[in-house]
Amino acid sequence: MAVPTVLYGKQFEDNIQLAAQQLISKFREKCVVKTGVRGSSKAFGYIDKETARDKVGRMADTIYDDASANRVTAYLEFKYKALMMDIEDELQVIADPKSAYVTGSLASLRREIDSKFLNALRGTKYTGRNGTGTSALPAAQKIAAGAAGLTLNKLISTLELFNDNDVDEMDEKYIAMAPQQLSNLLNITEIKSSDYNTLKALVPGKVANFMGFNFTVSNLLTKVATTRYVMAWSKSGAGLALGQDIVGRVDEVQSKHYNWATYASMFIGATRIQDEKVVEISCTEV
């Protein structure tokens, strides 16, 4: 695999710059994370809301109920990225590109974590004791696009859905949006004006916190035609299972004339845990 000719360096170049790319996982810490998973799947359990009983009299017997227990399953997949640098190319590049190759390999897996997580939020959920049932995100948890992008009314409707579902106020809430939805928000008076908020929701080029949501910009959200699917969720509403966290190495490959090669891999899965804690917000992009 040849190094692109654009890397054949200038005399004073002391490192090879990575192309603009997302280098970290933006959503890994914004959900329930299970590490050290063994096997090809991991179950996440939760209990539905329960109703308290009345004590019917003095010395009355205690009545025990079965908990309304539920479980969903994340199926893990092995993902890897390997890059090789031919010895001839290395001799012609003034800078040492190995560190950039390692960073690029690791970054590809971190983006894969985010893609898998975002797809799990709105995709098929595997249910039942053995994880063989399937469930789609209910229509009641979806906000229609209309002809608009991400608007104040859509944010209000999203928050109302969380409140209608009794999602704990202390359960951290997040919204993943694409760059165009950030532009939508930066033009909302209630966000950019200090007359409407005192929490400094607007910071240069970002929306830090508004209406209890933490916002993250991602280019990995699904788009179909002109509709972008923005996702909102609470931390306990989604899960990430790690059978093997990201590991990487750099080696010389004897069979390839001792070319340097980078290798990074992971074994991961993701799932929506509770539908009531996830909202899909459809936004029109123009």
Image (tube, rainbow, N blue to C red):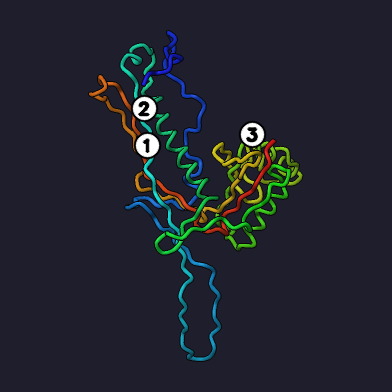
- Residue in view at x 36 percent, y 21 percent: 1
Query: Between residues 162 and 213, which one lies in front from this camera angle?
Result: 162
Foreground label between 2 and 3: 2
Of 107 and 145, nearer the camera is 145
In the image, 61 versus 125, the foreground residue is 125
| Residue identifier under label 1 | 80
Residue 15 location, quadrant? top left
Q: CA distance from mark 2 to mark 1?
A: 10 Å
Asked which secondary structure carries label 3, the reply is loop
The amino acid type found where label 1 is placed reads Tyr
Mark 3 — residue? 205
Q: Residues within 10 Å of mark 1 (few under 14, many from 20)?
A: some
Relative vertical location of residue 187 with respect to residue 274 in this rendering, above or below: above
Q: In the orientation shown, which residue stands out farthest toward the bottom?
A: 58
What residue is disc 2 on?
83
Tell me residue 163's x, y (percent). Answer: 64, 60
Sequence-first tag of 2 and 3: 2
Q: Position of residue 94 (x, y in %)?
A: 38, 12
Residue located 58% across and 60% down the image: 167
